[in-house]
Amino acid sequence: MGSAKKFSSVMDDRVWNELKSLSEKMKVDISSLLTEAAIDLIQKKKIRPGFDRLAGDLMDQFDSDLKKLAK
């Protein structure tokens, strides 16, 4: 994956405790869980604009049909 970067952040106590508990249950370090979560977030944010654009295009394309169905 490449070199790792060290950083500092602040997290809600409840979230931190759940993350720490999950880390212990899974027997993986917290850094691995945070990396996985960051990758998932990045992918989600990349997909969302494309999905929104496509949904808007479909709404425009089928506007009259959707209005008929809504009646």
Image (cartoon, rainbow, N blue to C red):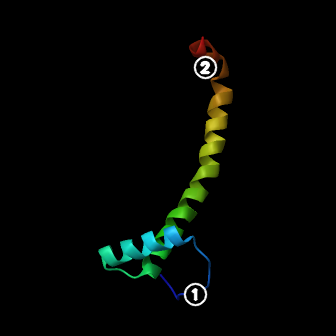
Q: CA distance from mark 1 to mark 2?
A: 49 Å
Amino acid on which disc 2 is placed: Leu
- Residue 70 is situated, as x and y percent measured from the top left of the image, at 59, 16
Q: Choose mark 1 or mark 2, whichever is in front.
A: 1
Can you tell which mark lies on residue 5? 1
Which residue lies under the disc numbered 2?
66
Q: Residues within 10 Å of mark 1 (few under 14, many from 20)?
A: few
The residue depicted at 62 percent of the width and 32 percent of the height is 58
Residue at the limit of the structure toward the front, as seen here: 13
Counting residues from the start of the chain, the first of labels 1 and 2 encountered is 1
Quadrant of the drawing holding the C terminus = top right
Picture quadrant of residue 21: bottom left
The residue depicted at 57 percent of the width and 53 percent of the height is 47
Query: Camera-side residue: 20 or 49?
Result: 20
- Residue 48 is situated, as x and y percent measured from the top left of the image, at 60, 51
Vertical relation: 44 (above or below) 18: above
